[in-house]
Amino acid sequence: MGYLDELKRQADAAKAQHTLDIGALGRNALVTDAACQSAFRYFATLAQQLNVLRPPANAEFRLDRNTAFKDLRRTDFRADSRLRNLRDAEVFDYVLLGFDMKSGARITLAKDFPPAIEKLESRLAQCGATFESEIIRDPGNGRFIEKRYEISADFHGTIRLIPDHDSAWIQFQIVNLDGFETVTVQFPAFEVGSALLDELARWIVGEPNAFLRDGHQLRRVEA
């Protein structure tokens, strides 16, 4: 066999492997997008039921050591999604279930220590509350006294599904379901069906659930 024949053999093997790879990616994308479509339909129906039930949040939502909110009800559930292009096909970019937790309270908080200011502002960014802030200084010498916040204590939460179509995995990003924290966990796309989503619904309602039990790369980050 000449060298040209050897190169042809290698090229044919590479083409065959490329065809196999493209085929596997296509199958993974189909499975993943079907899971996203099912999740979106599930969320749309779930939102309708939860907007009637208005389930209470069992968790405590704490802005600082002395300011916490309990027994908030979850309301205004809404399902949403966005599409994107992948290899000349339209697929899900994400699927989302959003909700509100409204206390109706307006509160004033003041912080005079940089780490405390940073911590509070991180939690305000996490919870989605609207607020105004003002730096208070001594009128005589201009020295910093405190940073004061006027806060409308109405909070937001989201459950976002972010698919990786090539690998056929789906990441859940769960924000402010059990306090001001973000939980991320991944599942194979073929596992994202009604059984898993039922466990998530139980978590939202505040019932015992096994949603996180078989998840992968679980991470919890408190604001």
Image: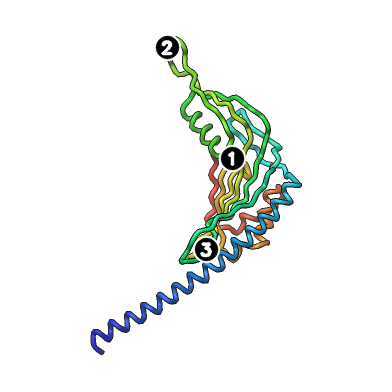
- Establish if 192 lies above or below 131: below
Check whether the beta carbons of the residues at disc 1 and disc 2 lie within 8 A of each other.
no
Q: Nearer the viewer, mark 3 or mark 2?
A: 3
Check residue 90 in the rendering and tell me which mark sits there, or answer none.
3
Q: Is residue 75 above or below residue 166?
A: above
Q: Which mark is residue 156?
A: none
Q: Residue at x 60, y 59 (%)?
A: 214
Looking at the image, is mark 1 or mark 3 earlier in the sequence? 3
Question: Image quadrant of residue 185?
Answer: bottom right
Q: Earlier in the sequence, mark 1 or mark 2?
A: 2
SS at mark 1 in the image? loop
- How far is disc 1 from disc 3 in space, using C-alphas? 34 Å
Whichever of callouts 3 and 2 sits on the residue coming sooner in the sequence is 3
User: Dot 1, crowdedness within 10 Å: few (<14), some or many (≥20)?
Assistant: many
Q: Quadrant of residue 18?
A: bottom left
197 in relation to 66, above or below? below
Q: Residue at x 50, y 21 (%)?
A: 146
Find the residue positioned furthest to the left.
Answer: 3
> Which residue is identified by label 1?
180
Res 153 seen here: yes
Is 94 or 1 nearer to us in this picture? Answer: 94
Query: From the viewer's perspective, is the residue at label 1 or at label 3 nearer?
Result: 3
Label 3 crowd (10 A; few <14 / some 14-19 / many >=20): few
Q: Looking at numbered disc 1 in the image, what kind of residue is underneath it?
A: Phe
- The x, y position of residue 69, in whole percent, is 66, 34
- In-front residue for pair 105/113: 105
Judging from the image, the colouring scheme is: rainbow
Query: Which residue was labeled with disc 2?
Result: 141
Residue 37 on image: x %, y % = 61, 62
Q: Residue 54: horizontal and vertical position, in percent? A: 73, 44
